[in-house]
Amino acid sequence: MLKKPSFYSVIIGTELLNGRRKDGHFDFLNKTLIQRGWEHKANFIIKDDVSLLEGVYKLIQQDANSVMFSFGGIGSTPDDFTRKVAAKAFTKQPLHRHKKAEKIIKDKLLERAFPHPIKMADLPVGADLIQNPVNQMPGFQLENRFFFVPGFPNMAHPMIEQVLNQFYPKSVKKYSCNFIVQSSEAVLIDIMEALPKEVELSCLPGFVGDKKSAEIFLAHVDQSFLEKWCSFFKEELHKMGLKYKTI
């Protein structure tokens, strides 16, 4: 388990981009991560394109702390190329027949496993299986960091919860302070730049009535450290004669 994972999701499906289907994954995964104290770093929704998928996988791989959930394309039809692209991008080796996956598919489908469904047992070298509670056709994972599940939400979502429970059950608790300042963002930039980089900062513009406002959100895992810098921010606001409201 990585101590400070950066969570990415890749949702593959031309049908999502051309409007034939609606995405059922992002909201689920985002809420599930937040409930555990994690958060998304990026989400990609891409069409069924081999070179595009490979590029996205390689981009994610460049982040030493990346944890990825990839949805779709692990079946046996001609447009299911996730297994092959994952092998190329993550192992630089061809697919090989995973014996346990082969047995699961044979036991479930019997003679219907051939000639095509059995291809779902061709996985990247070093892959471990992710149990599918719906139809038993497994997903797979690499390095306990890169997880590949079907595109069907009823299958994918329990599989995602399964691997999060196993590898990334809960983040270290973060403490936060949140307040709205009766000022534009621009006026507050010097204060924001004075904060240490370790403090998580978010500034959202808005309005209170017809006057500009800025919602400030600060967070850190060390409560006393956060309180110190939250107090600093508010003291600077007081010096500038700016009012704020804690939310």
Image (cartoon, helix red, strand yellow):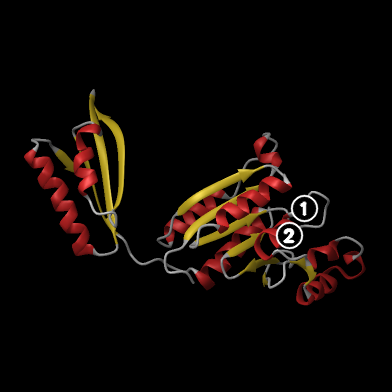
Q: Is residue 110 above or below residue 194?
A: below
* Whole-percent x, y for residue 3 in the image: 42, 69
Q: Residue at x 29, y 63 (%)?
A: 221
Q: Which residue is mark 2?
A: 83
Q: Residue at x 49, y 52 (%)?
A: 30
Marks 1,2: beta carbons within 8 A: yes
Please tell me the numbered disc located at residue 41: none
Q: Quadrant of residue 83?
A: bottom right
Report the label total.
2
Q: Residue at x 22, y 50 (%)?
A: 195
Q: Which residue is mark 1?
A: 80
Dot 1 falls on a residue whose secondary structure is loop
* Whole-percent x, y for residue 216 in the image: 26, 43
Dot 2 falls on a residue whose secondary structure is helix
Q: Is residue 7 above or below residue 95?
A: above
* Whole-percent x, y for residue 223 in the image: 22, 63
Q: Residue at x 69, y 57 (%)?
A: 150
* Whole-percent x, y for residue 157 in the image: 60, 59
Q: Is residue 214 above or below residue 173?
A: above
Q: CA gap, disc 1 to disc 2?
A: 8 Å
Instruction: Using the image as rendered, state which of residue 141 and residue 111 is in the foreground.
Output: 141
The amino acid pointed to by label 1 is Asp
Label 1 crowd bin: few (<14), some (14–19), many (20+), radius 10 Å? some
Label 2 crowd bin: few (<14), some (14–19), many (20+), radius 10 Å? many
Q: Is residue 247 visible?
A: no
Residue 91 appears left or right of 30:
right
